[in-house]
Image (cartoon, rainbow, N blue to C red):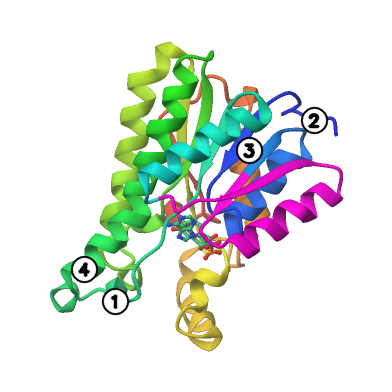
Amino acid sequence: MAGRFEGKVALVTAAGAGIGAATADAFARQGASVMLSDINAAAGEAHAEALRSEGCKAQFLRCDATNEEEVQALVRKTVETFGGLHIAGNIVGDAHPQASGAEFHLQSLESWEHTFAVSLRSVFLSMKHEIAHMIDNGGGAIANVTSLAALSYVGVSGAAYSASKAGVIRLTKFAAVTYAERGIRVNCIAPGVTPTEAYNKGGVEMGQMVINLLLPFQAIKRPIATSEQATAIAWLCSDEASMITGHTLPVDGGWMANH
Ligand SMILES: NC(=O)c1ccc[n+]([C@@H]2O[C@H](COP(=O)([O-])OP(=O)(O)OC[C@H]3O[C@@H](n4cnc5c(N)ncnc54)[C@H](O)[C@@H]3O)[C@@H](O)[C@H]2O)c1
């Protein structure tokens, strides 16, 4: 399949669903060989199989992105399978159910630590092992995912999620400066209201309520498609963005234009 990522190898975490699955689609349909990973093996394997049935080059490996041994094995397996690693979409991130809502004096330390592990440790571990390979192999491009909750007050997202996603922005900038001269670019996107299963943890009705609560904050008041997030990630990881690094790109229907 011809495209801007022909000859490139991409790795995507959280590729079983939502923005991660759409990112795997964007890389694979534009010619990359893609290693999909997710903690949900059934969903990730099914998505890789769907891409292969379209003629794309895609494999799946189960990986909990909070576990260093598994992340290291994922990077190793990607390189073994496809002969390199040039692009990475580090998409994993989430809030513990008990860390949602503004009033964090009521929330447990455990919910804080879980949220930081999923949203920030995962990005650190992914970048650590991806960059170790990229340094020795001519560079690469990485896109992480932060949140509008890191850029503005979103009470429903909770303090732990907001603070951990702010950490993703700083880690992105830190990596961008540290590794720029070794040919590695690192950016992140900040998605606006992008309906996925992440909204439905308290049920579909509750998910729709949250979407309806948040949408008025966007200037363009419609839900954002996961493919619209993936398009931005793919662009940041492409050679067209060759002078862009350390950047946080809101893909937010103008939410941040209001701040
Ligand atoms: N959807 C939105 O509106 C929105 C807004 C802002 C930020 N984000 C961020 O975008 C990213 C993707 O969110 P989404 O809405 O697509 O979520 P989603 O719930 O649709 O998909 C998340 C995927 O991550 C996987 N996953 C969870 N924990 C994992 C782990 N430890 N290791 C590996 N895989 C794991 C899940 O199995 C699932 O397949 C997250 O970082 C999220 O914080 C989403």
Q: Dot 4 lies on which element?
A: helix
Instruction: Specify the segment rendered in magenta.
Output: 36-65
Residue 41 located within the stretch drawn in magenta: yes
Quadrant of the drawing holding the N terminus: top right
Do tag 3 and tag 2 residues touch (Cβ < 8 Å)? no
Q: Which residue is mark 1?
A: 98
Disc nearer the start of the sequence (1/4): 1
Cα–Cα gap, marks 3 and 2: 12 Å
> Closer to us: mark 3 or mark 1?
1
Closer to the observer: label 1 or label 4?
4
Q: Is mark 2 within 8 Å of ligand 1?
A: no
- Say which mark, if any, is on residue 234: 3
Disc 1, SS: helix
Above or below, 130 against 62 in this view is: above
Task: Determine the residue positioned at 86% across, 43% down.
Answer: 55
Residue 239 magenta-drawn?
A: no
